[in-house]
Image (cartoon, helix red, strand yellow):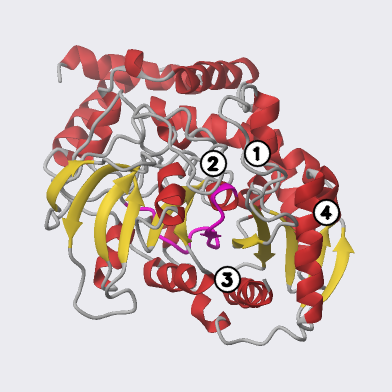
């Protein structure tokens, strides 16, 4: 770093804040900056290596669910002993290339993500990484650079962005898989593929080793064939981790506490706006689920959530700003970030942007341009609307133990059907609001009226750190189906 570089950096910083420097200040600050850089340069930006996966090979399954297959054995005993699991392609597994569904970058971590470590400590065997929409920024699997994923349970798309995880579980290729959820990307594939998807309370599952899409919205959680497995996996991976400052201080809910809980004194609010906005078949399926819950002793009443219909747009606005900022800063988020490794940051900084898919290119350019044009005012407005809606939802939990609504307002769309922003926003209409509020949300398949019809997901949303109530209601619904 030359003296000229240092002086330019000081002058640029002063201009950013409108500060006029004297010649003495200019030279003094430059001297201090040079000394500080030298001191910080003595720090080693390393992360302890993990035992790498073995037998790594490209995925080759009928659904294109896997990007890579591998072998990584977990502890001999534990709650997940004997369970085969996979993780999404934006979650680090030592020795397995991580692409985030993109041709623009490939990163082979030497360390495991926090959730990967916890799966192994709980006894799970990790058997691969799963395909996903590029950078987790779509909801169908069709933007994955490695080809679209097929839905084992329907003719339409498997949902996204955790497409491969949903398909791997639905196709019986694994016992459980991890996905990530910014606007619904665990629960949407769960709904379309007919499996269980569990978004935890915000920040209870650490995100170290995960490539964020939008740091104030991202969650990591499981997809599984049944509620018990999903609850057991979630319990194994949650809890604070100092490598993710955003998780420090979070409580550690126990989802499995709900497995044996009775629901006969539980009160549930059926969200009016979500029912009115859903396709007829979906509305009818959720009404039948409500009837079955009432037969089990649950009190179900209709409830309104003012502002609900605008939250998918709010989610999209927050995501756009946070994603474009993350990429511009090579994946670093200051203050509450998850502690990115230097190799990962270097990978993002050096990626070939011309290799990005059309969707991500458009999101980056338009998102950054809009932020520049309004100087961030749109983001501030979205965050204010977000807080108002969160207050509405918090208030409902003073009366109800849970909210009930369709996970998605439609069953699996055809490939190519989600072709504009309006259609995309509809896919996250019922899921995105609860990324904004941070409440846990569990998607459970519900029986449809006609045999052979596409799966419908039924979503239980509960108060912060009350995953157990969602599990109890999910189990009751499974028992009633």
Asked where in the image residue 416 lies, by quadrant, the reply is top right
Q: Nearer the viewer, residue 164 or 377?
A: 164
Secondary structure of the residue carrying tag 2 is loop
Q: CA distance from mark 2 to mark 4?
A: 26 Å
Q: Nearer the viewer, residue 79 or 478?
A: 478
The quadrant the N terminus occupies is: top left
Single out the mark in the foreground, 3 or 1.
1
Residue 160 sits above or below residue 306 on the image: above
The residue positioned 42% from the left and 56% from the top of the image is 169
Q: Is residue 199 magenta?
A: yes
Residue beneath disc 1: 427
* Range of magenta residues: 192-208
Q: CA distance from mark 3 to mark 1?
A: 26 Å
* Residue 336 seen: no
Dot 3 and dot 1 residues touching (CB under 8 Å)? no
Left or right? Give the position of 441 relative to 108: right
Mark 2 / mark 1, whichever is N-terminal? 2
Dot 2 and dot 1 residues touching (CB under 8 Å)? yes
Residue 392 sits above or below residue 155 on the image: below
- Measuring from the top left, give residue 400's x and y in whole percent: 79, 72
Residue beneath disc 3: 465
């Amino acid at each position: 770093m030359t003296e000229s570089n240092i002086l330019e950096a000081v002058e640029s910083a002063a201009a950013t804040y409108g500060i006029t420097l004297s010649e003495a200040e200019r030279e003094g600050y430059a001297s201090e900056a040079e000394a500080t850089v030298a001191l910080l340069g003595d720090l080693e930006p390393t992360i302890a290596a993990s035992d790498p996966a073995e037998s790594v090979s490209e995925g080759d399954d009928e659904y294109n669910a896997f990007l890579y297959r591998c072998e990584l054995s977990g502890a001999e005993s534990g709650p997940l002993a004997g369970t085969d699991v996979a993780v999404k392609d934006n979650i680090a597994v030592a020795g397995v290339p991580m692409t985030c569904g993109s041709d623009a970058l490939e990163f082979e971590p030497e360390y495991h993500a926090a959730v990967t470590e916890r799966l192994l400590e709980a006894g799970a065997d990790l058997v691969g990484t799963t395909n996903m929409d590029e950078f987790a920024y779509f909801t169908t699997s069709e933007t994955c650079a490695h080809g679209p994923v097929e839905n084992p349970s329907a003719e339409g798309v498997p949902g996204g962005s955790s497409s491969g995880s949903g398909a791997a579980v639905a196709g019986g290729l694994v016992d459980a898989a991890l996905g990530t959820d910014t606007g619904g990307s665990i629960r949407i594939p769960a709904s379309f593929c007919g499996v269980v998807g569990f978004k935890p309370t915000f920040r209870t599952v650490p995100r170290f080793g995960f490539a964020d899409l939008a740091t104030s919205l991202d969650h990591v959680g499981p997809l599984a064939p049944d509620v018990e497995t999903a609850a057991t996996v979630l319990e194994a991976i949650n809890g604070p981790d100092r490598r993710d400052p955003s998780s420090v201080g979070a409580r550690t809910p126990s989802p499995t506490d709900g497995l044996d809980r009775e629901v006969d004194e539980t009160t549930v609010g059926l969200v009016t706006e979500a029912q009115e906005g859903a396709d007829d078949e979906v509305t009818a399926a959720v009404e039948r689920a409500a009837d079955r819950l009432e037969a089990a002793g649950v009190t179900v009443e209709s409830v309104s959530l003012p502002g609900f219909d605008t939250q998918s747009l709010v989610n999209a606005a927050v995501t756009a700003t946070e994603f474009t900022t993350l990429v511009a800063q090579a994946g670093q988020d200051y203050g509450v970030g998850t502690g990115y490794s230097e190799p990962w940051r270097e990978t993002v900084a050096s990626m070939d942007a011309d290799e990005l898919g059309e969707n991500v290119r458009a999101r980056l350019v338009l998102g950054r341009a809009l932020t520049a044009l309004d100087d961030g005012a749109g983001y501030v407005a979205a965050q204010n609307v977000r807080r108002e809606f969160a207050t509405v939802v918090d208030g409902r939990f003073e009366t109800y133990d849970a909210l009930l609504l369709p996970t998605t307002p439609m069953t699996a769309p055809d490939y190519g059907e989600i072709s504009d922003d309006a259609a995309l926003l509809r896919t996250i209409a019922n899921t995105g609001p609860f990324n904004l509020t941070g409440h846990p949300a569990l998607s459970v398949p519900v029986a449809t009226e006609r045999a052979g019809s596409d799966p419908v997901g039924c979503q239980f949303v509960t108060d912060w750190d009350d995953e157990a109530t969602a599990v109890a209601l999910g189990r009751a619904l499974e028992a009633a189906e």
